[in-house]
Amino acid sequence: MKKVLIVILLALSVPCFAQHDPYMGIVPAPVSVKKGNGEFKLTAETIILADSPNHKAVRFFTEYLRKAGFSNTVTDLNQLAKGNKEMKNSITLSVNTKSDLPAEGYQLHVYDDHVVLNGKGAGLFYGMQTLIQLLQIKNNNLITIPCTNIKDYPRFGYRGMHLDVSRHFFDVDFVKKYIDVMAMYKLNTFHWHLTDDQGWRIEIKKYPKLTEIGSKRAQTKINRAGIDLELYDNTPYEGFYTQDQIREIVNYATDRFITIVPEIELPGHSMAAVASYPELSCDPKKTYKVAETWGEFKDVYCPTEETFKMMDDILFEVMLLFPGKYIHIGGDECNKTAWKNSDFCKQLIADKNLKDEEGLQSYFIRRIEQYVNSQGHSIIGWDEILEGGLAPNATVMSWRGEAGGIKAAQQNHDVIMTPGSAGMYFDHTQLKSPLEPLSIGGNAPLSKTYSYDPVPAELNKDEQKHIIGVQANLWTEYIPTPAKAEYMLLPRMLALAEVAWSPLANKDFKNFSESRIPHQLPRLDAAGYNYRVPTAIGASDTVLTGSKFNIELTTPVEGATIYYTLDGYNPRETDLKYTAPLQITVPDKMTVDFKTIVITPSGKRSVVTDMKLQNK
Ligand code: TNX
């Protein structure tokens, strides 16, 4: 009998994550971190001082402490005599910064007897988020904060995360939770995809049928189009936000320094609206239904005066609800069949000297832009709005690679990079494995998202200034539940945050994935989020050849356990615990299946990895 020999090597060191990490576990990595010695002890006696006591960051911080069991109140710094301003056992939150701090920047000093945070506006909020990441809650009476000196500010002004609520609807509470996690990681723009073929999700007072009809569909496609047999759930689906709910969410986001960019899709992706008001289409006599499956649909808005009037009315209400600069008007994947078949469109193309249907699309977007600009807002559109010529003031969101963004920047237009090919599509899978849940196709592992640099080398210095930021998108065709939305979002959103915030020189995937992600994930647990548990660091689906294998693993989540098997079975909590490096000796002509799983204290499980140890 040939025997497999396993030797468990003595553990030489216990991994201690944040201690060896130059960024002290903080995500996104700050511009500069100087670690000090010792720690500040936050107790019930700690005085919180603020020169702007009603600042949202100050209120957010005390509310955070209150939830952790600390009821420290805020003292107005302006009321204190001069000498008292850097009191012992105090935390000062100040908007009185030295002028060399860039926009949204902050400076945080943690000494062993007091803490000072400086930052204006959003800067104070981001500094407070960093401070919160540094807090170690020991018990109800004590929080410690390691001594440090941090100076920080973002690389990009636009740091976006998108959510598609049309394909699947997510309620107010979930949207707030989504905004919360964005704020934790210093993202500042929530792109809210409110309308599409499969559902109109925003109440418009003047056109009630948009939600009476357009927010409902008879059933939903539940498996991948084109690959499997056609499966539908045979269950009616509906949902929309009232204008009151929208206002509530806008206020909630504003309190967290997040601007919402609402998207009202036009002229394509508009089946839900066309089903509600067929007069918007080029063939009003046809009957239309809200789409039940995914893809590109032929029935789109017809560029009639009636359509433009209705679009202006809709956008008027939208602009009253959303105070931000940008309104996203879609512009992507507009199928031109209906326009090609329409005498009206042919005539319009001739009358306006538009060349072809692409010209007509450009005409459509320009008309909408004129109206949006007249109301004091600016449009963003997907990169298809380049086709037939860009509207004069439009910002381009480059999703089909970077080409559209590069072209737009060269034409002096602002650009937000969100290329699907570079890991910015969070509806893509996080690992190519049949163990991952159904996704739309495409692979965007954490490393791919992390390594994206939104500034293309092709652009010269002036053109590069037009890259105002970066965004990732969560399209929800195959994301029907909040738990799955969080699974697809996390931890990739942390990689996005670092792409958007941290200076290039501070980016380091090894440190990020092996030190800071393991430190952050338990925090997401504590905050009630689901996430994809990364597989054990050092394990992967691979084949290794040799006779002796040294296996050294680390857990991707602080406090989680790695279990393994060597018998081909999928490991679970009843199997062997990995506690120290292993040496496995495989006899001649044999293969050993070394399988691992990571299970967190909250019971979340990674997928199983399968390492084949082969002695040929
Ligand atoms: C393309 S990205 C779309 C969406 C889909 C997405 C799926 C874009 C502007 N259009 O309508 O949901 O792909 O990944």
Image: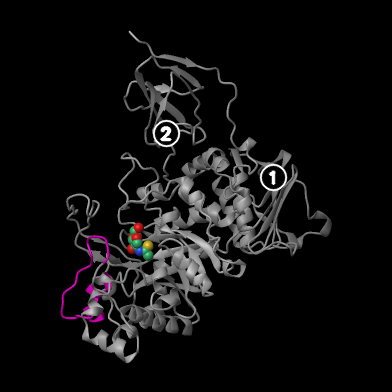
Q: Identify the magenta region.
A: 272-296
Inspect the image, locate mark 1, and give the three-letter code of the amino acid beneath it: Glu
Task: Pick the residue in front: 602 or 274.
Answer: 274
Q: Tell me if residue 4 comes above or below residue 394 in the rendering.
A: above
Inspect the image, locate mark 2, and give the three-letter code of the amino acid beneath it: Ser
Quarter of the displayed picture in which ligand 1 can be seen: bottom left
Q: Earlier in the sequence, mark 2 or mark 1?
A: 1
**Image side of residue 264 versus residue 87, left or right:** left
Residue 239's x, y, as percent?
30, 63
Residue 27's x, y, as percent?
57, 48
Residue 517's x, y, as percent?
52, 42
Where, by quadrant of the figure, is residue 511 drawn?
Answer: top right
Q: Indicate whether residue 363 is drawn in magenta.
A: no
Mark 2 sits on what residue? 540
* Residue at the spot 80% in from the left edge and 54% down from the top edge: 84
Other-residue count near label 1 (Cα within 10 Å), few / some / many at <14 / 14–19 / ≥20: some
**Image side of residue 188 versus residue 19, left or right:** left
Residue 377's x, y, as percent?
49, 78
Where, by quadrant of the figure, is residue 302 drawn?
Answer: bottom left
Single out the mark in the foreground, 2 or 1.
Answer: 2
Task: Pick the residue in front: 142 or 153.
Answer: 153
Q: Tell me if residue 183 comes above or below residue 509 in the rendering.
A: below
* Residue at the spot 31% in from the left edge and 67% down from the top edge: 196
Res 360 label: none
Q: Indicate whether residue 290 is drawn in magenta.
A: yes
Image quarter in which the C terminus is found: top left
Mark 1 sits on what residue? 45
Residue 94 appears in the picture as rendered: yes
* Residue at the spot 24% in from the left edge and 79% down from the top edge: 340
Residue 494 appears in the picture as rendered: no
The residue most toward the right is 83
